[in-house]
Image (spheres, rainbow, N blue to C red):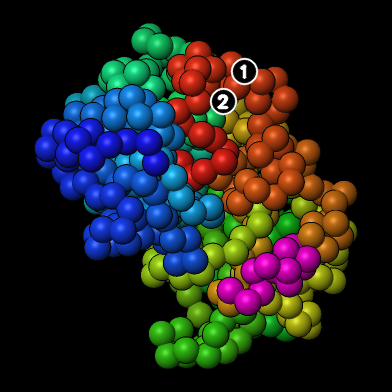
Amino acid sequence: MTFTDESFAELAGGVSGVVFRRGDAGVADETAAQNVLVKHDPDVVVGAADEQDVAAAVRFARSNDLAVHVLATGHGAYVPVTDGVLITTSRLSALAIDPERRVAHIGAGNHWSSVVAAAAEHALAPITGASGHVGVVGYLLGGGLGPLARTYGFSSDYVRSFEVVTADGEVLRASADENADLFWALRGGKGGFGVVTSVHLALVDLESFYGGSLFYDAESIPAVLGAWADFTATAPERATSSVAVIRFPPFDVVPEPLRGKTAITARIAYIGDPAEGERLFAPVQDAAPAIFGHVGVMPASEVSMIHNDPTDPSPVFDRGMLLDTVDHDFVAAFLEVLGPEQQVPIVAAELRHIGGATARDVPEGSAVGGRSAGYTFIMIGAPDPSLFGTVLPQIADGVTAHLARWVSTENNVNFAGDLSVPGSYEASWPAATFDRLASVREAYDPTHLFPYPDAPTAS
């Protein structure tokens, strides 16, 4: 800690939001993460009320030789922040829809659910993530592969501009026409460039689609997984689908048909004639008798119900990667390590079909990693912290090795998870993109005020 009481008092008196220093009573609540194991304890916390507060915090950090870290909605935190200035942007909640231009102006504190609801009032929709509880900005900075990805592409493809506070404490607009190199980097390059305070995001005309999710019991997992693999081999771009083997706990909050059971869920979102979507998905739907769930025409405003991800904070262990392909040999190998007979503390193992529109970059180019892959694969560990140090990493390593012939050499930073896993950071982009990102970071942050990937970034 290098700042004086006088400089801290000047910062606190010059911002509209809240300001804390280490040891203050409000630090824990202000910096709470979705991953409850991550306890941030920086030198200074600035709860920014507006863009000017962000700029003031950055200038304070720079003048006192302190690193700058960012926390928005609390997702994506794997490493505790234990030094420097932590800027929380959750109060930057501005949200406005321009229905004529089909663009949303979104402050950095917004979750996807707010944007989805606001856009739906105008029969519009963002290309959102799977969970409405995830923060918009952090998700977009990594690219974003949501439940409509094969049809519409990466969510970051729809960004039209960012407002960013850079290392000199100035506010820049980054777009295809202004600071184009920074704009390229922010669409998929994740962190280390500055503090994104807001984003302008293009929306699409979408009121409803054919979609939903179905659940099948443990004995049906091989049949459903095989049928899904066959479906994805010929599925059109209008269809985005996923499957997940889930080990449900015996809790009352879990629907009774799934309580305490191992099951597989098959999910679909089809943009087009619902009858055609139903026909295409029928081989998966009819691979076995479903025990829970529904597919049919659903409002675009309910897109998060396809995955229905949990929202409560909890201990988090995950390991993600991309796959080149999924075939019947992969299905057999997957079942050997993660099938219902395996006694492993992996509560969910999810596969998403990507490709289609995600394989095509935007005309001006972007830093998104993973466009060459065909699928995503993520393992979520049991929320038992005693397993996090050794057991779950060893299991994740073993599964990855067992499936190695299908694993892509390229990852996406949003799926990589904890970037402290050796090689995960470098693998999140193609080599040329990785090198160019380093050059852009050096140009906009030559003193390395925004450390990355050594600390969490906005999410």
Q: Is residue 11 above or below residue 459?
A: above
Q: Is residue 398 above or below residue 255?
A: above
Identified by mark 2, the residue type is Ala
Give SS at disc 1.
helix
Residue at x 23% of width, y 40% of height: 5
Residue 312 in the image, given as x and y percentages of width and height: 39, 70
Decide which of 325, 317 is in the foreground and name it. 317
Q: Are marks 1 and 2 in contact (CB under 8 Å)?
A: yes
Q: Earlier in the sequence, mark 1 or mark 2?
A: 2
Decide which of 419, 101 is in the foreground and name it. 419
Distance from Cα at disc 1 to Cα at disc 2: 9 Å
**Where is mark 2, residue-wise?**
367
Q: Which mark is residue 436?
A: 1
Res 385 → quadrant: bottom right
Q: Which mark is residue 131?
A: none
User: In this orientation, does residue 443 appear?
Assistant: yes
| Highlighted magenta segment, given as a residue range | 385-396
